[in-house]
Amino acid sequence: MNDASPALAEIAHARGIHKTYHTPGGEVPVLRGVDLSVRRGESVAITGESGSGKSTLLHLIGGLDAPDDGALSVLGTDLRAADDTARATLRRNGIGMIFQQFNLIPSLDVRANLGFQARLAGRFDAARAETLARDLGLSALLGRYPEQLSGGQQQRVAIGRALAGNPPLVLADEPTGNLDEATGDAVAQLMLALVRQRGSALVLVTHSARLADLCDRRVHLRAGRLA
Amino acid sequence: MTTGRLARWRLVLGALVSHWMRRPLQLAMLLAGLMLATALWSGVQAVNAEARASYATAADRLGTGALPRLEPAGGQALTTADFVALRRAGWQVSPVVEGRLRNGTARVSLLGIEPVTRLGLTPAANDGGDASAGPGPQADLGAFITPPGQGYATAATARALDGADLRGLAIVIDADAPPNTLIVDVGIAQGLLGMGENLTALVAATAQPPGAPPLDRIAPHLTLSDPQAGSAADPAALTDSFHLNLTAFALLSFIVGLFITQSAVGLAFEQRGGVLRTLRALGVPRAEVLALMAAELAVAALVAGAAGIVLGWAMAAALMPGVAATLSGLYGADVAGSLQLRPGWVLSGLGMALAGTALAGARGLIQTARMPLLAAGMAAPWAQATARGLRLQVIAAGVLVLALPLCLAVGGLVGGFAALACGLLAAALVLPAVLDAVLRLAATRARGVLTGWFVADTRQQLGGLSLALMALMLALAANIGVGTMVGSFRSTFTGWLDQRLSAELYVTARTEDEGRAIRDWLATRADAILPIWNAEASLAGQPGRIYGVADDPTYRDNWPLLAAAPGLWDSLAEGRAVLVNEQLSRRAGLDIGDRIDLPGGALPIAGVYSDYGNPSPQVMMGLDDFGHRFPDAPRLYQAVRVAPDRAGALAAGLADRFDLPASAIVDQSQAKRVSLQIFERTFAVTAALNVLTLAVAGIALLTGLLTLASIRLPQLAPVWAAGIPRRRLARLDLLRTLLLAVATGAFAVPVGLGLAWMLLAVVNVEAFGWRLPMDVSVPLLARLGAASVLTALAAGALPALRLARITPGQLLRVFADER
């Protein structure tokens, strides 16, 4: 991985990506030749109908899955050639992930969850974490456990966890999909503001046109292809 | 290894361990399961190790452990003349006489050795340092071998022999002597045991001098035994069956304990499925996750294993006196009643804890390794029984059932236990499928919405509870099987005692003169005096005892015969035939009409009698014939027939007239009481293990229920929301547990009875040499049925109480978006 290079303007580069799921009911092609480029500091919204391949594309960029065909490079790592350890290293050091289901570690309190990925990457900074907690409005909740938080609070913790290590790329999979409209808007605004403040690139998948409009760029997927 | 990686591992391990910190009860169950499993295993191993160490000490001390033995084949006699012939031919051999001395109810092993020839048998001994091969280093050889001689024994053994007629023998206290053993010169031992010139065996140097003529030229009737194979007189060989029996129970308890561990670990893997995916999504490689989870389990295994070893030590210390009594009473093997810390069983306990944890955690680790990063959940959730899983279990059970006759065909004790294991495991595997079928049937008959839901919900819980129910079934089946075996043994033994101990009084004189005087005195006062002389002899190649008995209706009417030829008692009285005990008949394959070699000539067998509680071969012959064959046997022991209401007065009169100690006169009821006490002590260890196994199964059920309770709120919340109050849901939960326990108990009955049959018809015959009729006890089954219900109530109460007290808020969260 070569994420440390400041000269690398293009953070993620996908060319002709294909992905097919093999199910008991037969083969389901999800992505059919997708091209996408994400530049440093840029925010990109991926929209599309359910089943159009949005989340699959995000997972491929995050190294959570591997494409069947095409070229995919993220932060200098060729993800078609990378093994499990190399992909894990990329996720740990270069990517902040935000999930629709929050995916916090239920047995750790807010403070531990917030610093978890930064510590994993060896980039934990207590002062930065404290500032982040304050910015996210979590200062009073640091001793609580995820089950003691509302959905909006949990998603703010998840955003904090993704950003605490200052990763060059943040991926968010329907980050407001589990929240009501008002909470979702607030969380989205906060997320975008913090991402921009840190100079990270953001790729988010969303059904929300309002959220997509807040991003620098919007790409639309239809039946596995960019529309 | 970089500091960063270490810090990362610490962080991930912390996240994994935090799961247990937030669920202390689940952690306690995991540790309890492992601890109990290890405790039961290592406790029994500690007992076995102690007993085996006692045998080894005795063997080393007596010099019998590593030396080959020459023993007579086919029950022929081995005499001093054989020894002399072998020595003259250049063979390095030394004579041995082995037997038992009785003093009231005490029995002490008597070992006769010849110290001079014995010293030359081992290279170390040639340096003059083999003090262990005979009397202590300070021994006065002249006093040792010259009548009345000296005997070496521990202070405890000397106390047990206090008041016994040892023909003037002086006992020298030797703290290093083997437990419960008196060591004397071989000639002295022959006299004390009435063996004349007969010997039990000759121990031989491992390497005989070159040029020594072959054995078959000098003494063709002798065979050389392999010291590694163990001789019939070797306590280690004799008691192997007992130790294997204990090990089998320990293994069963260990497996039951592992069910708890499997339950807790399985649930933990399922509960942490999301966390594991998150960890990997955040950049922790799969291999690291697996390694750290394995490390976490290993730490748990070591902590719980260490605690289990401490608990096992305490358990073994409590059981050891009972085991020592059993080994002495049933096998004549002498074992110290105290316990020492031995690295062997400590390491074995920790090894079993680690292996058991690996076994319990293997499925979870494999599932984690195979878990796709983006899957919604595990492929086969722990709490749901899949039809495929049930089918596989039934197929595995079928394979085990097919293997059962193969194990029986292999034969032997190991074959018997392997068959038992196949049967029990097959029954356990098939149990969930049987319960599922019963519930499916119940679903078709269910009337009403709530009943329908109850049956369907019970079916859904079956997967999560199946391991605990299998553990309960195994524990109940073991209880039924062993309880039936012990009950059968007890009823047979009681009836046998009534037949065997039909005389009212049994009197032991201190000297032959006193014996004669006692018989003269009794001649006018008792209805009949039945002398019972006996002598040690080699019977079918094993050390045994021959009894001479009078011709009397006491024997003709009462003796517990298993098989008899016509005119048995007449031919016995006339010296034309003998009786043999069941052990000798089975082990040597001797039956009615076969001839058995005896000192003084072979005789045909006219009958076989049951002889429970005696590990050794035994022969009964007419008193006159015995007198001719064993003129030197001491005439000390006699049974006395008298009207039962006069027995007490006669005993008191005897004691007064001859100043006999209390131990010299045993009345029938006292003898029966002592015999039954020995019997109860013998099975106390097994009973204790049974109760512990049932307790462990109860904990397994509690673990299963508690873990299920923690993940089934989403199934209960809709029913609660539909109008069923929490208290009623709790009552239904308890009822479900009870019904499942009762169904499991019902399933355990035929399995337990099958186990009992196997124990009685296969294992006991192999282990002890006798077979007992099976006596099914309804009260026992009722007691165990109640135990099953109580276990279910105890295990189900806490989860039901928790459910009754759950707050509406907790239930509502199931419906809330944010859950």
Image (spheres, grey):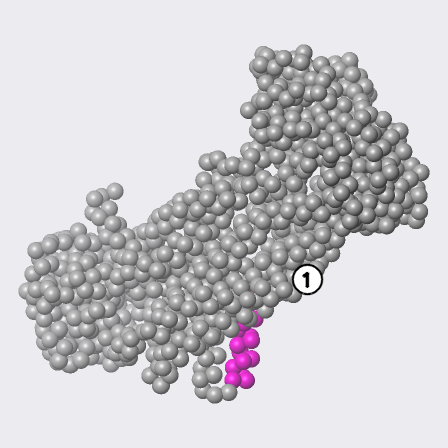
Instruction: Work out whether residue A75 can be spotted.
Output: no
Q: Residue at x 58, y 64 (%)?
A: B783
Q: Residue at x 44, y 77 (%)?
A: B732
Q: From what the image shows, is residue B140 above or below residue B768?
A: above
Residue B792 picture location, percent across and down: 48, 67
Local secondary structure at mark 1: loop
Whether residue A197 is in magenta: the answer is: no
Residue B416 picture location, percent across and down: 66, 51
The one nearer the camera, B24 or A219, is B24
Residue at the outermost bottom position: B448
Instruction: Determine which residue is flagged by label 1.
Output: B776
Q: Is residue B124 left or right of residue B263?
A: right
Q: Residue at x 10, y 61 (%)?
A: A9
Residue A131 picture location, percent across and down: 7, 61
Q: Which stretch appears magenta?
A: B429-446
- Chain ID for label 1? B
The one nearer the camera, B618 or A14, is B618
Q: Split into 4 quadrants, where in the image is the C terminus of chain B? A: bottom left
Residue B270 picture location, percent across and down: 37, 64
